[in-house]
Every structure is written in structure tokens, then in C-alpha cells.
């Protein structure tokens, strides 16, 4: 049997294919910008399910390909540690907070590591419990919750806690995930 990649069509990587902006839909649908710290953000409204929630994501353009053989699994471990504790949130307080405002671990709060990126997702309510859009002032509960969600993303980007006991616990969880995936793969 031949090698599949020998039959693939050659791809020209010259030019602007990797530098031109991503296609983000019709003009004006997505607002983008760059913060002073270099973080690029994208805002798109009206597409989040369930209604009344804002989807927030942190995309880190680094994954398992950045690891040496000795470091294999570190990106996945860091992803797990993010839910454990940060400088500001201790002992799964991030998960407890998000569940207290109506987010569920799994569909509303999750992360994954791929070869080239690590992505954290969370959904937070963006409306006041009174049914309207909130008053829009700094004390508006919806804005307070949205601000808290953005703070969580910031903690995940810069302040994940790396205590030996946290690492040991999550390492065991990841090893169990690996065993389960190997068993299910046959």
C-alpha cells in the first residue's frame, strides 16, 4: 500500500494565504480589535445558544506541537490546571462561580488542546434576571457577570496556579483520560 501523502496535490504556500484576514462573514457582522497588550478580540452578537448567554473564548495559539518529547502532555496539563485554580480563584472556584450563574460544566464551560492551539470556552448570561437588558450601568448584574467572565479568561491567560499537589492530581486525571481513550480505540 502506498503512502497517502504521496498522492496529495501540492499546495502553494507562497503569497498572502497565511497572512490575509480570516473570513468572518458579511462586512460588519464581527467587530475586531487589538488591545494594548496585543490580544486580538472578536465580537459577534446574536448567534449564541441558548439565548441570553454570551460565548467567551480564549484562543492560545500554542498546543502540543510546541512540546518536546520530554514535555509531551504539558499543554493538556496546563489546560486542566486552569479549571483547578488561578491566582484569584482557588480550588475550583471558577467552575463553582460559573455554575452559580447558570453555566454548566461541559456545554457552557470547557476547553481542549490540539496540536496547534489551546482553547477555553465559557458562556455567561448577558442579561439581568429581570428579563430586560439591564440598566447598562456599572452595577448592572449582567455587566458584572460579563466582566467576571472576561476576568476568568484573563486568569487563564496569565495566572494559572502550578502547585505540586494540583499538578499531581491533574496528572492522574490526564493519565486516566489517556487510558480510557486507548481502551475505547481498541
Image (cartoon, rainbow, N blue to C red):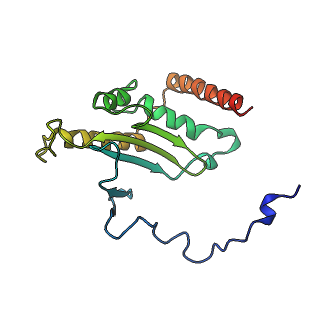
- Residue 158: x and y in percent read 41, 43
Say which residue appears at 63% left-offset and 27% top-offset. Answer: 175
* The C terminus lies in quadrant: top right
Q: Quadrant of the N terminus?
A: bottom right
Q: Quadrant of residue 30?
A: bottom left
Residue at the bottom extreme of this rendering: 15
Q: Where in the figure is residue 18, as x and y percent of width and height?
A: 55, 69
Tell me: residue 41, above or below residue 171.
Answer: below
Q: Is residue 131 left or right of residue 28?
A: left
Residue 68 figure quarter: top right
In percent of width and height, residue 134 lies at: 14, 44
Residue at image x 63%, y 49%? 65
Is 113 on the left or on the right of 130, as rendered?
right
Give the tally of numbered discs.
Answer: 0
Residue placed furthest toward the right = 1
Q: Residue at x 45, y 37 (%)?
A: 110
Q: Is residue 7 above or below residue 179?
A: below
Q: Residue at x 38, y 58 (%)?
A: 38
Residue 23, placed above or below residue 137: below
Image coordinates for residue 19, horizontal then vertical, percent: 51, 70
- Does 37 appear above or below 11? above
Q: Nearer the viewer, residue 131 or 105?
A: 131
Amino acid at each position: 500500500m502506498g503512502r497517502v501523502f504521496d498522492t496529495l496535490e501540492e499546495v502553494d504556500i507562497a503569497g498572502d494565504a497565511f497572512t490575509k484576514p480570516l473570513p468572518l462573514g458579511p462586512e460588519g457582522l464581527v467587530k475586531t480589535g487589538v488591545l494594548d497588550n496585543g490580544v486580538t478580540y472578536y465580537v459577534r452578537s446574536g448567534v449564541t445558544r441558548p439565548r441570553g448567554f454570551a460565548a467567551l473564548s480564549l484562543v492560545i495559539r500554542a498546543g502540543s506541537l510546541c512540546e518536546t518529547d520530554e514535555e509531551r502532555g504539558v499543554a493538556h496539563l496546563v489546560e486542566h490546571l486552569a479549571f483547578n485554580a488561578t491566582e484569584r480563584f482557588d480550588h475550583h472556584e471558577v467552575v463553582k462561580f460559573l455554575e452559580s450563574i447558570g453555566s454548566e460544566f461541559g456545554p457552557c464551560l470547557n476547553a481542549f488542546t490540539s496540536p496547534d492551539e489551546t482553547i477555553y470556552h465559557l458562556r455567561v448570561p448577558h442579561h439581568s434576571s429581570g428579563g430586560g437588558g439591564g440598566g447598562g450601568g456599572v452595577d448592572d448584574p449582567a455587566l458584572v457577570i460579563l466582566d467576571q467572565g472576561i476576568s476568568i479568561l484573563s486568569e487563564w491567560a496569565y495566572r494559572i496556579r502550578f502547585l505540586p499537589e494540583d499538578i499531581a492530581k491533574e496528572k492522574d486525571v490526564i493519565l486516566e483520560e489517556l487510558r480510557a481513550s486507548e481502551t475505547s480505540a481498541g
